[in-house]
Image (cartoon, helix red, strand yellow):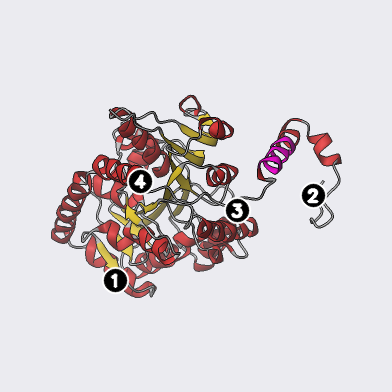
Amino acid sequence: MTKRPPVHQVLATLGYGDAIGHEVLGIQRVLRGVGFASDIFVETADPRLESMTRDYRELPGTSDPDNILIHHFSIGSKASRIAYALPDRMILVYHNITPPEYFIDIHPLLVRLCYMGRRELTAYARRSDLAVGDSEFNRQELEHLGFPVTGVLPVVPDFSHLEVEPDPLLAGRFDDEWTNILFVGRVIPNKRIDNLIRFFHVYRTEFNPRSRLLVVGSYGGFDRYLAMLHHLIETLGTPDVHLVGQVTNEELTAFYDVADLFLCASEHEGFCVPLVEAYYKQVPVMAYSATAVPSTLDGAGVLYRTQDPLRVAAIMDAVLSDPGLQDAMIAAEQNALDRLLRRDFAGHLLGFVDQVARSPHLPRAEIPPDFWRQLDVAQRLEELRLYRPSIFQALPDPPDAPPRSR
């Protein structure tokens, strides 16, 4: 019997409780469950998950041309570049990179990182044996970028974080006779929180003054965008807009429990997990029809194709003032959720692994002759930056590099 090759995963960061983290851990469970050796190599991990990972710098020591690396590509990383240089077969998993233009004048560093990440992604078209997205939208983007063999690996649905007791203080604060409009997601420009505020302003002014907007999600690193949102709220003179920030699972559960409508205005999504979280919590969903959102909704919810605040507010009112329509929406959402839960994630994953294991080896990727030496130098410099910052700051800048801030 032929021994199965190890199938390892590599990514920049393993986060706790996010969609990518759920998928990475789900992949490992499936692989180990059928007998594959499978470790997770990262640059950083949430402290709660560090014991489940290995340092990405150990990858070369485990490398073999018959091994398979499942590479979760993000905005470029040292882990990605090591994965590129190794002879192992590769399945690239693409979770989408937000177009950089969304961050112009908001987050200049992220503009550069997103641009560089999207440009670096194209190099993996000739390096990857297979490239998969977690949605058909992401798969089509890979195909457009020149990846010859693509597929869709379904999202791993995990709602355990919502199966907790809701925070009683928060539930008591918002569980009243008012109408609660909810959005869950990071407070970043592509989510178009500004449009949510405009839509809510018209809904509250023209249809229902006893309503509030609850925006739940981290705004860390986007202080400039947050300030713009507060300025917009003040300019419109709209009360009862709550930019809540990051919350616990108990608080998130309470927000879903008190919500009367989940409203999404996002213009760019690779999948958008909160949409199916709202399905799970039986909240009617309205969402702007863009990128992966229509396929995620899967025929349920209400898709709108206008950004005119009055028209969107009128649709909101039509949903919120009709209990029969809300019941029909929730029934359709439960059917869509059932279809998602019935998708054979394990079967798709193992089929992709078998497909790559049986395929001919690709030609070795071309890398600069001094790649490993340069990598070693970069790692030594990073250690100095972290642990001997005074020495790092004293080093001279390269002749062609912009001055570092001291």
Q: CA distance from mark 1 to mark 4?
A: 50 Å
Residue at image mark 3: 223
Residue nearer the viewer, 80 or 117: 80
> CB atoms at circles 3 and 1 under 8 Å apart?
no
> Please, what is the three-letter code of the amino acid marked with disc 3?
Asp
Q: Is any atom of residue 311 visible in this view?
A: yes
Q: What type of secondary structure mainly makes up the magenta span?
A: helix
Residue at image mark 4: 356
Q: CA distance from mark 3 to mark 1?
A: 32 Å
Q: Identify the element where label 3 is drawn.
A: helix
> Please, what is the three-letter code of the amino acid marked with disc 1?
Ala
- What count of labels does the image hold? 4
Q: Is residue 115 left or right of residue 236?
A: right
Residue at image mark 2: 405
> CB atoms at circles 2 and 1 under 8 Å apart?
no
Crowding at mark 4 (Cα within 10 Å: few <14, some 14-19, many 20+): some
Q: Identify the element where label 1 is drawn.
A: helix
* N-terminal-most mark, 4 or 2: 4
Residue at image mark 1: 314
Q: Which residues are magenta?
A: 372-381
Q: Is residue 327 left or right of residue 64?
A: left
> Please, what is the three-letter code of the amino acid marked with disc 2?
Ser
